[in-house]
Image (cartoon, rainbow, N blue to C red):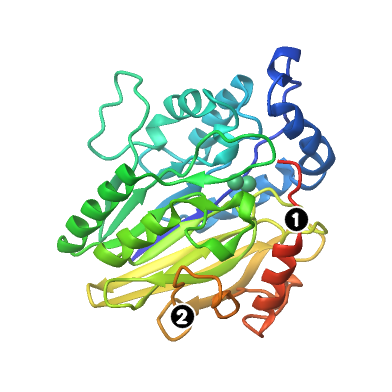
Amino acid sequence: MFTLAHLSDPHLGPLPDPRLLELASKRVIGYVNWRRNRAVHLTNGALEALVADVKATAPDHIAVTGDLVNLGLQREIGPAAEWLAALGSAADVSAVPGNHDAYVPGSLDRATRRWAAHMAGDDADLHHHAAPVFPFVRRRGNVAIVGASSAKATGPFMATGHFDATQALLLSELLKALGHEGLFRIVLIHHPPIREATNWHKRLVGGSRFRAAVAEAGAELVLHGHTHENTILSIAGPDGEPVPVVGVPSASQLPGGRRPPARYNLFAIDGKPGAWDCRMTERGIVGHNLDIREIATRRLDAAMLPPPNRGDEEHQGAQIGWSGAASAGMSPLRRGSGTISIARRMARKPKLR
Ligand SMILES: [Fe+2]
Ligand SMILES: [Fe+2]
């Protein structure tokens, strides 16, 4: 059996005071937003408690799906590298970047070069300080971890991700080859590859390419962050069977905010091609102190998954599943609340990013 812990969106703080020149960009909006929102609701205390619990469970591997930092400042990138190294060795921790890591032009290249050891495939040459190439592949036991990047600098008020044709082609080829090797394929990407999972200004541009790659080549599990919500959705595999798409709340979120408090998911993977067994355990903050507890555990199989996303909006109500919800004070699992939640989400005005 192989165990993988998935956490996301630590938005590491504290944010260093930006210099005046650094604020002469989209960052001025992000800085105001951080002071008003993230500095209050995302804390290192919650993150430290969560990471301590991750380490106590001693997973075989840890996946981090982006938004390590806030404004892509040079002085955020170094501490984030130290945080990654403290989380685990580069061989045992796989990370992909998020939109906040690519906050303004130039941020993504600087960040990913610095974090390359945790974002490189097994056969990458790390001696030339090159930026990592996505998607990367890491083989661990009967599991293949495929790291895709949706991170790209965007304009003010936008937090979109981008998945281009080159990555889509590579992803499809890699997934086919890894499928032939008989591996359980886990794809990491920051933005959810499903249109209805988030607002228009936070969507994944090119999400249809990602879905087409999975529909053509297959995958066993897709993990994402970005929404700061706990969700279980699905997209179609080669025979139309649902491939689970699992999102996790921010690893730094305090209780009492608009988003669910800090959480991570632990996946226990066993079996063989055609008979995989994947059990998902959610652990995180429950209540108003920072104790980490088990929230829910379930087998990720076709019977519990919502129907695959079909890429159009008229079916959106049936495709949201809210996981582990009742104990976290959210709407219970798929009690018809998905439609309401989506409607609310659609009605929200874009907020400062
Ligand atoms: Fe985030
Ligand atoms: Fe994000």
Side of 130 where 281 appears, left or right: right
Q: Residue at x 16, y 60 (%)?
A: 181
Q: Observer-nearest residue: 11 or 149?
A: 149
* Percent position of residue 188, x then y: 42, 52
* Percent position of residue 233, x then y: 51, 71
Q: Amino acid at mark 1?
A: Leu
- Number of the front mark, 1 or 2: 2
Query: In the displayed structure, would residue 216 be above or below residue 27?
Result: below
For the residues labelled 1 and 2, the Cα–Cα distance comes to: 35 Å
Screen quadrant of the C terminus: top right
Label 1, on which residue? 290
Q: Residue at x 73, y 50 (%)?
A: 350
* Percent position of residue 129, x then y: 35, 20
Side of 28 where 243 appears, left or right: left
Visible residue check, residue 68: no
Q: Amino acid at mark 2?
A: Pro
Q: Residue at x 65, y 37 (%)?
A: 12
Return the mark for residue 304: none
The quarter holding residue 4 reads bottom left
Query: In the displayed structure, would residue 145 be above or below residue 332?
Result: above
